[in-house]
Image (tube, grey):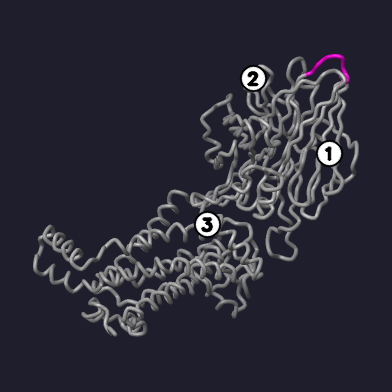
Amino acid sequence: MEDQNRNLILAMALSIGVILIWSILFPPEIPAEDPAADPAVVLAVDENGNEIALTPPAADAATVASTEGAQPVQAVETARVDIETDALSGSIALTGGRLDDLLLRDYFETLDDDSPNVRLLSPVGESGAYYALYGWSPAGDLAYEDVPGAETPWEVESGDVLTEATPVTLVWDNGNGLIFRRTIEVDEHFLFTITQSVENTTDAEVRLAPYGIVARHGLPDDLQNFFILHEGVVQNSDGSLNEIDYDGVTELDFVQREGSRAEVTEVTESGWIGFTDKYWMTTLVPGQNQPFTAVTRYVEGAEIYQTETRLPTVSVAPGAITESSTQLFAGAKEWETIRNYENEEGIDGFLDSIDWGWFYFLTKPIFWLLHYLNAMIGNMGIAIIALTILIKAALFPLAYKSYVSMARMKELQPKIEELKEKVGEDKQKLQQGMMELYKKEKVNPAAGCLPILMQIPIFFSLYKVIFVTLELRHAPFFGWLNDLSAPDTSSIINLFGLLPNAAPEPGTIMALIFIGIMPLLLGISMWLQQKLNPAPTDATQAMIFAYMPWVFMFMLGSFASGLLVYWITNNTITFIQQYTIMRSHGHKPDVFGNIRRSLSRKKPAANDAGPPSGRK
């Protein structure tokens, strides 16, 4: 078989093998039902370094997990302070002072006109409880009753509605000489600033430590569970990025106490920790140059995932006021917004909260280019096509070198066949003879493979950028393609919309079988690419070769349509490049002849496996 055909079949077979292995090792996972009534565990460190509970056993959403096990909690009716900004809406619960109700104004669950906004945070008692909680842990002679907890009845001291221009200040007097205040501010995007203060009106010094918590009850409903995407805990500690998926959180090595697992990291200068989804994120951000302890925790049985930031214990002298200011990011992972927080707010390494993957040195500049192409063109689908063209143009010298090497190998094919006939079954002599032939003709058999290997990381990076970035979500292309992050919604079953019956529901077996227009175009583009060369002379190999495009068509048909736009564009450009390179080397590909032979199921002529014809 020709070297070019062999390489292509091998690449396709390996690709199918990788996809099948991943589908077996990482099958789609059904999210567990949310035990919203179960408690989170909230712990801190006292002045002696011993862990203590932040709230008394009667607390609701942050109930201490005792050795007897966690007790269920119910939803708490509470007064609230509204949140109203251009980007966010929701409310703050005065019971506990929790940020537990947050909607993203610019993002919707579906493309339907009546679709609700994406809900990021939800209170305890609702499905998928997900919230941020702040407070102080007692140290020294202070008791639980002396510090605010999850049931603390905060009052509004100033600010009726939290907006970009009007912060809200909550106050609580513990009745024993300590007055706690919590001022909450928010910018025009997704960054909250929480300033906690304690005023000591007693005649004795007090010691206590500020903390912040993000807790998630159960797994998120929209968990992707796909190997190319990280979902779970994301953390930056003194410039070091750490990612733990939800399964990894449940398997943390350090068992803090019965029913609780944790990972503790001491951060000396700067960092942040929180939960990331495919498109959304909630992250605790202590002040930069502020040492703190970052904790990842899992409460077994209750299935609660938790991230914490614990700041050092402070002393408050009689008559003094001490305050601690931290930030909370709760919103969409918009590249430009997060980049501005890193550059302007000084949140170190914050852009790495987007899952750039192993090839971050490629995915970051690729997305930067895609972002600005989309800004100039105004259509993400066309931007993907333009980006693919630019990348293929940049890699053309490698593609050209690869084909030239394969063309030289093809020219040596008759001599190799003669050598095979001469040496018979003696494989050692065959190998020696081929090496001598390569040396004599100055041909390197591996020269065609190296350029292809160099292209793989680039194309994988482009694939990842299209898959994980928010900018493709609900981004229209044209016609029926109104969401490049979703599969093609057209279908053969209704003749691509010509018939009145509905297309199969995306994600079902029927949708995989009755595919849409984009998967069909993908299969056709791969099939045409094959027809640049005659089919292999071996019947079995020719059959495998012929079925490969249609196998890929069905396998990739349920992928995001933005990825299919990339693959179709890439295949089309590759066809044009290979056709042009073959013509430049004096060989005119008989595309239509190869199609006729494949359709008539005739074996290719004997000279098809020989050297290129039509030398100029």
Closer to viewer: mark 1 or mark 3: 3
Give the spatial CA distance, label 1 vs label 2: 35 Å
Amino acid beneath label 1? Thr
Q: Secondary structure at mark 3?
A: helix
Q: Which of 46 and 100 lies nearest the eye of the viewer? A: 46
Main SS of the magenta part reads loop
Q: Earlier in the sequence, mark 3 or mark 2?
A: 2
Relative placement, left or right, of 61 versus 581 is right
Quadrant of the image for the C terminus?
bottom left
Say the numbered circle drawn on residue 464: 3
Q: Is residue 599 magenta?
A: no
Give the spatial CA distance, label 3 vs label 2: 43 Å
Q: Is residue 203 magenta?
A: yes
Relative placement, left or right, of 613 versus 178 is left
What is the x, y in percent for residue 118? 71, 54
Over which residues does the magenta segment extend?
201-206
Say the numbered circle drawn on residue 78: 1
Amino acid beneath label 3? Lys
Q: Measuring 39% from the left and 68% from the top, which residue is drawn there? A: 399
Q: Secondary structure at mark 2?
A: loop
Give the spatial CA distance, label 1 vs label 3: 43 Å
What is the x, y in percent for residue 460? 47, 58
